[in-house]
Amino acid sequence: MRKILIVGAGQSGLQLALGLQSNGYEVTLMSNRTADEIRTGRVMSTQCMFHTALQHERDLQLNFWESQAPRIEGVGVSVAGPDSSRVVDWVGKLDGYAQSVDQRVKMAGWMETFAQRGGQLVIHGAAVSDLDYFSRTYDLVMVSAGKGELVSMFGRDASRSPFDTPQRALAVAYVHGLGPRPEHPEFDAVRCNLVPGVGELFVMPTLTTSGRADILFWEGVPGGPLDAFQGIKDPAEHLAKTLELMEKFTPWEYARATKVELTDANATLAGRYAPTVRKPVGRLPGGGLVLGVGDVVVANDPITGQGSNTASKCAHSYLHSILEHGDRPFDEEWMEATFERHWEKTQHVVKWTNAMLGPPPEHVLNLIGASGQLQPAADRFANGFNDPADFDNFFFEPEKTNAYLGSLTGAQG
Ligand SMILES: Cc1cc2nc3c(=O)[nH]c(=O)nc-3n(C[C@H](O)[C@H](O)[C@H](O)COP(=O)(O)OP(=O)(O)OC[C@H]3O[C@@H](n4cnc5c(N)ncnc54)[C@H](O)[C@@H]3O)c2cc1C
């Protein structure tokens, strides 16, 4: 039986560990926190996942919370104009629903399942020296430790990483008591509120440790008025700042948030990081090799809500590469090829996410504006969150955007 070590129990590491386990591999999973520490700890993400990524979980029968988590049936876009007005407001319908399950719930639950199914769970914050030792005793060592210190083993791929500094300051609050969007009270949607030059507010439902909740998530351009959470330690102060900024920049969202309260004492998160693509193979001091997984190799800014989706797709792709490789050695050539197979699809996510971080060019403004009158364009934009490769067909180049919009207006005219 092939022995595999996975370091880091997040979306990618756990999905891969459980997938390998159910295929008969002997898997050891190393986590720097226990399931209980994760469950009672701080929120980590907004973790909205779209159909394809959710389907990878279903295929492994890991969709434990599907019936409880709110179904997110649309993605809406609003754009703030002068004097807090709203110049754009539409919602596109998703072909398959999205869901957000608080990673505290999901990772704690998956970790317990892994152990119950006989997996070796080691609670230990791995250091490079540990990996040096383990790379000699396991057939394959994979590092899925997110954006933690172990990423330093993997070189930054400058050709695939246009930014070397954070592009947004992030501030998350999980709340109970948010009202529905009055435009569509009958269904849930991720609401993206764009405040040009300043940042974005994302609002979405989730399933958290205390049941259904909503997430208020500010992404602020560094140094701007939304970059206001550094140094705030008190969760109540964090929520008050969130609401103050909503009242000022997105009053239509504030209107349904006047009665909210935090879901728990660890319901807030603030931070920032530079979006980075890394080389997939880490070389240990003793000569052993480790393969990076998930955010270790591709960390996108959360502006497009793609990280957990990409982590799930990475785990899915790597699982198949491992199964197909049979008993052959997991050498450097295989590791490189395994990552490139994942990159083939993920490059579209990176391209789109990085584009969304910059000021939108005129044709994109036109597309977003026109989607208010053209429901098929709104729907296509929404479904791009599930399959960002489609943006290549109508988003990046003015000619393609214009041709697409023309085809819709022609068809309607
Ligand atoms: C504010 C915010 C909002 C987001 N919103 C979304 C969204 O809506 N949709 C979406 O798809 N993505 C979103 N993301 C991104 C998403 O959360 C991540 O991309 C995803 O969790 C990455 O999964 P992963 O398995 O690579 O790493 P992680 O989920 O980070 O897991 C890594 C694990 O490794 C552990 N670890 C770290 N170091 C060690 C060590 N030395 N030894 C052992 N264990 C270690 C960590 O504790 C953690 O449990 C968001 C991220 C942020 C910050």
Image (tube, helix red, strand yellow):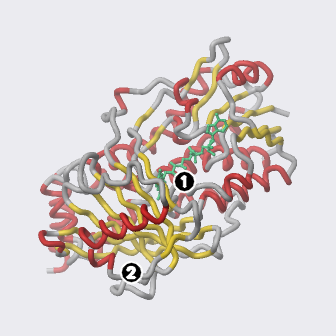
**228 lies above or below 319:** below
Q: Which residue is mark 2?
A: 258
Q: Residue at x 45, y 83 (%)?
A: 187
Say which label, 1 or 2, has the lower sequence index: 1
Q: Position of residue 277 (x, y in %)?
A: 43, 34
Q: Which mark is residue 44?
A: 1
**Between 310 and 165, which is closer to the camera in this rendering?**
165
Residue kind at label 2, given as amino acid type: Thr
Q: Residue at x 63, y 13 (%)?
A: 285
Q: Is residue 54 visible?
A: no
**255 lies above or below 54:** below
Q: Residue at x 76, y 18 (%)?
A: 136
**SS at circle 2:** loop
Label 1 beta carbon within 8 A of ligand 1: yes
Q: Position of residue 358 (x, y in %)?
A: 23, 47
Question: Local crowd at mark 2 within 10 Å, few (<14), some, or many (≥20)?
Answer: few
Q: Position of residue 178 (x, y in %)?
A: 45, 79
Residue 139 image-quadrant placement = top right
Describe residue 109's horizontal placement relative to residue 183 as left or right: right
Q: Residue at x 42, y 44 (%)?
A: 300
